[in-house]
Image (cartoon, grey):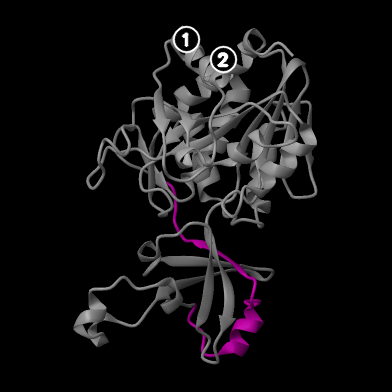
Amino acid sequence: MDEIKELLKKLSNTHGISGYEDDVRKVVKEEMEELVDEIKVDAMGNLIAIKNGGKPSIMIAAHMDEIGLMVKYIDKKGFINFVKFGGWFDQTLLNNRVVLHTEKGNFYGVIGSKPPHLMDAEDRKKTVKAEDMFIDVGIKDRKEAEELGIRPGTPITLDREFRELQGSRVTGKAMDNRAGVAMMIEALKITKTDATVYAVGTVQEEVGLKGAKTSAFGLNPDVGIVSETAIPGDYPGMKEKDSSIKLGDGPVLTITDASGRGLIASPAIIKWLEETAKEKNIPYQMDVSSGGTTDATAIHLTRAGIPCGVLSVPTRYMHSGVEVIDINDLKKGAELMAYALENAGRYFNV
C-alpha cells in the first residue's frame, strides 16, 4: 500500500465526531510535525500548522470531524436513545454497528428498531426514522450502562474500517473529510512554496462550519483553499445534469455551492487553480452545486472578506459510512494544491 493510501487509512479508521476530534487531531499533528515550523491548537480545538514564508499568506482548511451520534437517554432496560450529529439520511443508520466512546474505553453496539415482522403493511413501506431506532450494547439495565461510563453526552461513531476495492478505488467511513485532510498533508509534503502557509485541521464543520469561522478570524490570511470532498454523478440513481463529476477524472474546483447561498468563489481563485492545473497537466473538474456547503463559506465571509476556493476529491455515497474515492484523484488534488501554493504570488500581490 502506498504512502498516501496508508495515511488515508489511518485517518479514516480514526474516530471523532464534531466537538470530539481529539484522536484525529493527534494523527494530524504527528503527520505534520516535520513539515512545518510551528503547530498550535486554538481555544476551539482547531489544529493550526504554520509554515513560515513571505506573502501571500494562504490558509488551507480541512475539517477533521465526521458525522456521528450522541447518547441522549438510556431507558431502564439499557437501550440507548440518540441524537444525530451532522447530515444523516436516516435509513443509512439502521442495522449499523457503532462504537460508544467513554472515559472507561470503547464499547460496541448495534442500531436496531421494531422488526418488520411485527409491522403492519403500511409501516413496512415507510423509512424507519432515527427517532424510532435505538442502540443495543448487550446490557440488561441503565445501571450497567452507567458502570461502563455510558451516559447522556457519550459520542458515538460507526464501526467501519478502511478497505481497498478494485484498482485505485477504496472505501471507508469519514472520507468526508479525512480525504481532504490527507490531501492537505500530502500537499505540504511535496510543495516548495515560499509563501506563508497556515494548514488548519478545523473542528465542528459538520454542525455549522464553526472551527473555520474562529480560525480564519484569528489568522486573517490573504487567501484560502478548503480541502474537501465533492459528490459525483457517475453511479445508478444519479443524473449527469445534477452532477457531471466522475471518479478518476481528477480533483474538483467549486465555482459555487448551495445555489450561491454558500460560497461564490472569487474569479481570481478559479483562475489561479485552473491555470495551475493546465500548466502542470493535471486533470480537473468543475462543480456548480445546489447542495450543501463547506468551510469556505465561513472563511470567505470572515473579517472584511477572504478570497477562498474549494479543491475536492470526488466521493461516492457521502455521509454513509461506505464512502468510495479513487486514490488517483486524491494524489492529483494534492499535486494541484502543492503547485498552487508555489505560484500564489503570481496571482495575489498583497
| 280 lies above or below 134 | above
The reply to whether callout 1 and callout 2 are in contact (CB within 8 Å) is yes
Q: Is residue 268 left or right of residue 249?
A: right
The residue depicted at 41 percent of the width and 48 percent of the height is 318
Q: Secondary structure at mark 1?
A: loop
Q: Which residues are magenta?
A: 137-163
Is residue 297 among what the camera can see? Answer: yes
Where residue 128 sits: x, y (%)? 34, 73
- In terms of depth relative to the viewer, which is nearer, 342 or 243? 243
Q: Residues within 10 Å of mark 1 (few under 14, many from 20)?
A: few
- In terms of depth relative to the viewer, which is nearer, 134 or 230? 230
> Of the residues shown, which amino acid type is indicated by label 2?
Tyr
Q: Is residue 57 magenta?
A: no
The residue depicted at 54 percent of the width and 88 percent of the height is 75
- Quickly name the residue at label 2: 339
The residue depicted at 42 percent of the width and 38 percent of the height is 289
- Quickly name the residue at label 1: 280
Q: Is residue 218 left or right of residue 151?
A: right
- In terms of depth relative to the viewer, which is nearer, 257 or 144? 257
Is residue 26 among what the camera can see? Answer: no
Q: Is residue 227 left or right of residue 324?
A: right
Reading the chain from its start, which is encountered first: label 1 or label 2? 1
> Of the residues shown, which amino acid type is indicated by label 1?
Lys
